[in-house]
Image (tube, helix red, strand yellow):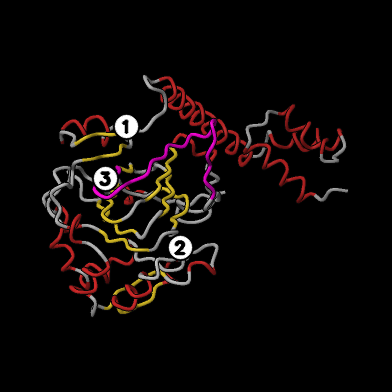
Amino acid sequence: MMSQSDKRVLIAEGLAAGDDDAALHARLVASGVSAASARYEIDRLGKDPMAAMLRRQAARMAKQGWLLANQERLAREADGGFALDTLQAPDTDYFYRHYYEANRPAKLTGIVDHWPALTRWSLDHFARVAGDAVVEAQVERERDPDYELAKDDHRRLVRFADLIDWLRKDEPSNDVYLTAYNSGTNAAALSILWDDLAPVDLLDDRGARDGFFWLGPKGTLTPWHHDLTNNLLVQVMGRKHVRMAPPWALDRMRNSRHCFSDWGNEALAGASSPVLETVLKPGEAIFLPVGWWHQIEALDLSASMSFTSFRRPNAHVEDYVSWGTIG
């Protein structure tokens, strides 16, 4: 016989799913509850304020689902279908009006052609100008399936020259990666590399000196997640494969913790999948709007810069509350 606690769990699941009384009755009976007992439980719900609140919340979620479904319809019915635009040296006002403010990603070319880093950056250059620096990296990632969620556990200080020597092996690995999360240490330790950058028209007056440095071997992979800010990712050395999924795909992204997807390292490729993808080459960039899911894999030894210093407020994290378990 099913316990009262188990019945309450079934009822709560049904209410959260939007079941009406008939569907809730069928759910209970299908799980082994007698028809009479199921009817008794449902009759009790009429006096339960928690049940009423769950039903109102389910109705709100259904409305939100309808709104997201309409966004998907509009995206797929657009001229050219659901696709990633490529913009060549876009006008700043045009970019902000049609992409930043529209929460729409874009691949960008011609915005950093003036960077000395495009010709200077190499492992030899890094060793020559900053080899003695002590930097922070994410290490031993391959032993931990939750390496991205547990970033603090993987932080280590290393001599930059030692890391460079390891990278010279040019072997595929996801074990060691200098990421934006390490910038608290690395922005000062590697500040000389910022001299190889130059202002970017799409960013505010802080420009390239307010960026985050990424360096790792072929095979480094940032699993599916969404950011809490708008981001501009600029590729300087090597190539990166970028996959993106829109906010309206939330119910397909298996988001049960914070901003991470349970899909992790899976590609999610397929004709019916709402995924846009591209390969970034040196000198190319991609605008990753806040709330867009993305997965990024290095196809070569790779160095990149990312930026959040746009010409608009970018403080979306201030009212974010879903830091823990979601579902």
> What secondary structure predominates along the stretch shown in magenta?
loop
In the structure shown, which secondary structural element does the residue marked by tag 1 occupy?
strand
Q: Where is mark 2, residue-wise?
A: 172
Residue 211 marker: none
Does the residue at mark 1 contact the one at mark 3 (Cβ under 8 Å)? Answer: no
Q: What stretch of residues is rendered in magenta?
A: 266-286
Residue at image coords 71%, 40% = 11
- Which residue is found at the position 30% from the left and 37% from the top? 106
Q: Which residue is mark 3?
A: 284
Q: Residue at the spot x=35%, y=49% of the render?
A: 228
| Residue 100: quarter of image | top left
Residue type beneath disc 2? Pro
Q: Is 274 a magenta residue? A: yes
Q: CA distance from mark 1 to mark 2?
A: 30 Å
Task: Say whether residue 24 is left or right of residue 203.
Answer: right
N-terminal-most mark, 1 or 3 = 1
Which percent across, then down, holds residue 145? 55, 62
Is mark 3 in CB contact (under 8 Å) with mark 2?
A: no
Categorize mark 1 by other alpha carbons within 10 Å: few (<14), some (14-19), many (20+).
few
